[in-house]
Amino acid sequence: MKGILRADLRKNVKSYAATALAIALAVAFLLTCLGLTEGLKMTLSRNLTEEAAGADLIVSTPNGVPYDGEDPEPDYLQKVADQAHKAHPEWKILTRSAMSLDLSANRKTVSASVLGLGNPVFDPSSVVEGKRPSSETEIGIEQSNAKTLGVKVGDTLNAEIYDSATDDTRTVPLKVSGIYKARPGAFPTSYVTDSLVKAWAGDDYLANIVLISGVGATHLDAAKAELKELISHIPDAGYYEVFTADQYLDRAVDTMVGGQDVLLVLALVFPLIAGVTAIIVVSVTYNVLFARRRRQLALLRAVGATSGQLRSLVARETLLVGAVSAVLGVLAGVIFSAIACRIANLADTWGQAFTVLNWQSLLAGFLCGTVISFLAGFAPSRRVAQVTPIEALATEDKLSRRRKHRTVRAIFGSILFFGGTATMVYATLQNHRLMMSVSEQGDMDTYTSNFFLTAMFAGMISFLGLVMLTSIVLPYVTSALGVFSSPAAVTWRLAAENTGRNPRRTGATGAALTLGITLMVLLLVGAASVDATGKKLIDEHTPVDLQLVSEGEPLSQTTIANVKATSGLEHTIAVNGLLGSAFPWGEYEKAQQLLSQPEKLTQDENGGCVIAATSEPCEPDANYRELLLESKDFSAISHSQIPVIAPGHVGIPQLSDEEVGKPYAVRSGDKVLKLTAEKTPLDFISLNPQDLAGLASSTQVVRPAQTHADQELERNATVLAPRVLLMRISPDCSFSDIEQLASDIPAASEQDAYITGSAPDRAMFTQITQGLMWGAFAMLGVSVLVALVGVANTLALSVMERRRENGMLRALGMTKGRLQGMLAIEALLTALGALVVGVLAGLGYAIAGINALPVTELASAQVIVVPPLAIAAAALTIVVALLASIGPARAAARVTPVEALAHD
């Protein structure tokens, strides 16, 4: 059998070369999917969890979990770090906190968040020039701040530090040791040593996260459990939670998109689709290949070979072909995934792009290619081995057997398609219902992931059934198209009859094309819909790009003019406002009761009021000031509609559904209005100009022991003047442009104001969705290649099987051109049928897939987009089919009638 194996491989090298190409492309498709998934995960980790860079374990506040008790002790996280270091001295530990500073140089001032640096493993960004700060006299700043301040490495800038001893600010000179790359999705950040942050903060130092590295991937779960046990006895332990790096990333993703583990979706869906694609395409190729070798295998049976020996022979052939093809596919996959990640901006450098796939992924790709080859060849080889020598040596299969096989295949395909579709629709509807419930109630159902996974696997079963049914039904459809030709169109009629006369060949070609078209439409519609939905959500929740805010003195006309002149801004609107407060009416009434008993009122350390026997009197909400802004038409700067607040109402940011319509007390100075609460997408309390003017007529409240600065603030608080400048950036602004704007605008303001807004988040989301789109394009390109190879393989093998038939046509007078045209029409008819089925199936599976995703906003704010590119790509398969027919048609035309008729 070894000699037969070598002879078979040599004899069928051309046929196996086409099969090997299909397997290699399938493996490349699989690895491209995995590479894009890993690249996206790496980008999300870099963009969303940069403050926890390098950590194996993170101790932080659980997202969205309210704390019902008193605030934790300020040094709680430091105690956590001390306990962890005591138990494991080998661990690298950093307690990290951020603070804000004003940095000045060359008569310009910028505001920046300052992070403390510890072990380099925890650095959240990279130095592009110079070195990281290593002493308490050095600072690292981002490129945008460096450009705004006009400083470079080695220059000195001044930092304004609050001095708790003097209750005033002091200036500290710092040397710029390095220029840092910007942190995605964040406003400009500066870096100093961790010890310097602690020294500046003094008694007010409060870490907000503990980072632990050096645990090791194999001991994460045990280390997490041990750490939780170590810190469980520390007071306020329930306020924080221990996360692994992956869990922390999942939490960040949930916060951003409002769903469960979206990375699980990406990690499972595309690779599994790639695997199913590969099995179907390669199975189609093996079906035709082994059907062509029926006579050869039957002769082996006739000379004494058993069916088991034939199956063993074919199994070894498929394993060998699969292994060689898988190696080629792995190499191609590494290249394809690197190109895709680099173009999609999911990797910063080519070196990073080529290493995005780890060895486990490469091994998985190799094993998948080998297994796919074996599984795809198993069923065809088994059918061939079961055929008796007499049947196999016959010119054609017996009609009854062919009909029986088609009947069984049709029944099995119908069960898979209709059963899988019904299950997919049920799971999708259940998931959608749960997601709607989550978006309304905020309580994630534990069964959501199960419904998603059920819908996903049911969809794959449905898709497999669809391909099987397509391979059976499509030949009858294409042969019926011959009716629409004129009697003189002999070539067209012959082509249509040929597609129905050998349904196996037509079905195989149609299945490959249907698969490719469905994947194209599914990927492009899915990616475009997720992109459109995400942008719609960001526009609704954070409609303003940037906003300059002053909570002290109102914005001066000079500041407004300087900011408006900043390059990169499209529109600006200055908004008048006051300083005040808003809280539920019931809390206001409770506060009034407290004020009626001044002898029992005291101010606690957090500025609130409590009942006590004797103490210094205070007033509720004395230290609780918010901006009360004028509501008006913001359409010039808003990405979505911001409703104008009606008189008697107040817009409250992040208001829950339960609070809508409830009475709220809105206060400024000695004036209080009882207004009806409604939601607003802005970050500030919004009032109708009429109500706001009424509050502005009040007088300031003079409190005992106020400093001059406090009294000045109170006087400013009741003055109706510009306090916020809302800005819309130019649509062509890149992320670096936004970063520079975030640095230039505060510097142009020339007063104590800070900048916020959604522009960095919008840019980060755009980067991620563009990565998804480019990933879809990359997988689209590979799927087109897979479909092209599938069509070319089946047509080429069809030409080989019909060599005598084609020779007879040539002998009867058909020219080479007409013969080539006949094969092209066959491919065209098959492609047209596959186009209709593929477009409809792709749209259906895309809509079901979007609804099945465990993301709450996709349920409540879903946008289905059918990009023109999806239809154009689907129509491209017509061209693909015609191109795939050129080679086989030319091969058929090159054979003379004598050679063809002599063929056995």
Image (cartoon, rainbow, N blue to C red):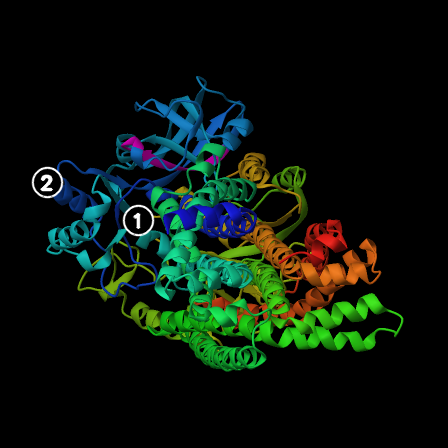
Q: Is residue 193 visible?
A: yes
**Magenta extent:** 110-120
Asked whether residue 825 is drawn in magenta, I would say no
Residue marked by disc 1: 245
Residue 705 vs residue 80: left or right?
A: right
Tell whether 254 sits left or right of 542. left
- Quote the CA–CA distance across marks 1 and 2: 22 Å
Residue 167 at x, y = what percent? 32, 37
Depth check, front residue: 430 or 482 = 482
Q: In the image, what residue occupies the spot 65% across and 54% down? A: 637
Toward the viewer: 735 or 352?
A: 352
* Mark 1 residue element: helix
Question: Helix, strand or loop at disc 2?
Answer: helix
Instruction: Locate residue 370, reporting x and y percent.
Output: 40, 52
Q: Is residue 284 left or right of residue 835?
A: left
Identify residue type, mark 1.
Answer: Ala
Residue placed most toward the observer, 515 or 719: 515
Which one is earlier in the sequence, the residue at label 1 or at label 2?
2
Q: Which residue is mark 2?
A: 86
- In the image, is residue 423 above or below residue 75? below
Q: How many marks?
A: 2
What x and y, as percent, mark residue 725? 60, 49
Task: Give me the residue at 24% from left, 55% from top.
Answer: 240
